Image (cartoon, rainbow, N blue to C red):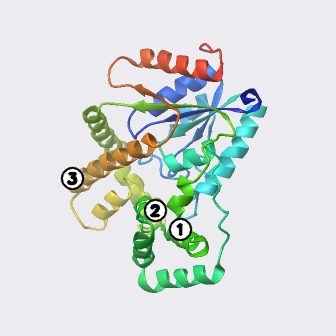
Amino acid sequence: MSHHKPKLLVLIGPTAVGKTKLSLELAKMLNAEIISGDSMQVYRGMDIGTAKATPEERAVVPHHLIDIRNPDEPYSVSEFQSMSERLIEDITARGKLPFIVGGTGLYIESVCYKFEFSSAGQDDAYRKKLQDMVQRDGPQAVHLMLEHIDPDSAKRIHVNNYRRVIRALEIYHITGKTATAFLQGQKKESPYELCIVGLTMDRAKLYQRIEQRIDEMMEQGLLEEVRRLLNQGYHRDMVSMQALGYKEIIGYLEGEYPLDAAVELLKRDTRRFAKRQLSWFRHMENIHWHDVTEGNFFEHLQVIHGIIAGNLRLRAEYT
């Protein structure tokens, strides 16, 4: 029955592995439109630090779910899921291939396998109690509660993202089951004819590329980008400003350490982030892994194109 399901192509991999360049060429070859699977590229004005595709690249291939929120507006995995589902339907109806590209594992999996997020209902009185606690004692107070109940969720959810922390506590309060248990219990059956390609690379080379990319971001004006956001009234307690590249530079701008220390901190944090991404992807199923450590771009493009064409039964050449 799989031929009745809409086709969905997904390209995942750690930060700086080379997803953007490959995705642009693949999208041209396969008549695809790209849906950004990155939880931070949704924010306007956060361009350099989130490594968004440039306006020129976006002019070549349509991109979706980029620049759809201001940095002080909330955005959640369930919103990403419902927006992506509508986009997949729309792109398919126009005779094109929906193509999710990104590194936010939970967001991407939620669409690939249609995770259920809201089955736990809500308890307004309990939620209010936790919100009052945040106002009184700061977000650390509820995050500490989550660490005791559900350490895996506490690792996954940043301390300042107290809305998600409260939701995870509320799920446990109502059901007696942790948010992690809900995630693990999701059925791994896709509503799509799915092809997930994962890019991997020798760890030392990936770390080298991460450091090089951060040096390039600094040259492109990351410092000025963060300064501009602060001048617009955005601040470090916002979920968006906890993104890699922003929190470290804010620390420098607020006098906590010199600029070179901020850059070293950013490199270290990004290496750690890449490690977490890889460990999340390793738990995902049915990924066609492709190692891009050696060889040239065109060779990788041909191999990956072959994997996709075989799995989704597609024929395509350059257009």
If you read the primary sequence from the N terminus, does the residue marked by circle 2 or circle 1 appear first? 2
Whole-Å distance between the Cαs marked 3 and 2?
Answer: 32 Å
Q: Quadrant of the C terminus?
A: top right
Numbered disc 1: secondary structure: helix
Q: Is residue 71 visible?
A: no
Residue 19 at x, y percent in the picture: 46, 33
Q: Amino acid at mark 3?
A: Asp
If you read the primary sequence from the N terminus, does the residue marked by circle 1 or circle 3 appear first? 1
Q: Mark 1 — residue?
A: 168
- Which circle marks residue 260 in the picture? 3
Q: Quadrant of residue 76?
A: bottom right
Numbered disc 3: secondary structure: helix
Whole-Å distance between the Cαs marked 1 and 3?
Answer: 37 Å
**In the drawing, does residue 58 fall left or right of residue 98?**
left
Q: Residues within 10 Å of mark 2 (few under 14, many from 20)?
A: many
Q: Amino acid at mark 2?
A: Ser
Q: Mark 2 — residue?
A: 153
Residue at 65%, 47% in the rendered image: 114
**In the drawing, does residue 37 fall left or right of residue 206?**
right
Report how many numbered discs are placed on residues in the image. Answer: 3
Q: Is residue 219 above or below residue 246?
A: above
Whole-Å distance between the Cαs marked 2 and 1?
Answer: 8 Å
- In front here: 44 or 7? 7
Residue at 30%, 64% in the rendered image: 251
Q: Is residue 26 above or below residue 52?
A: above
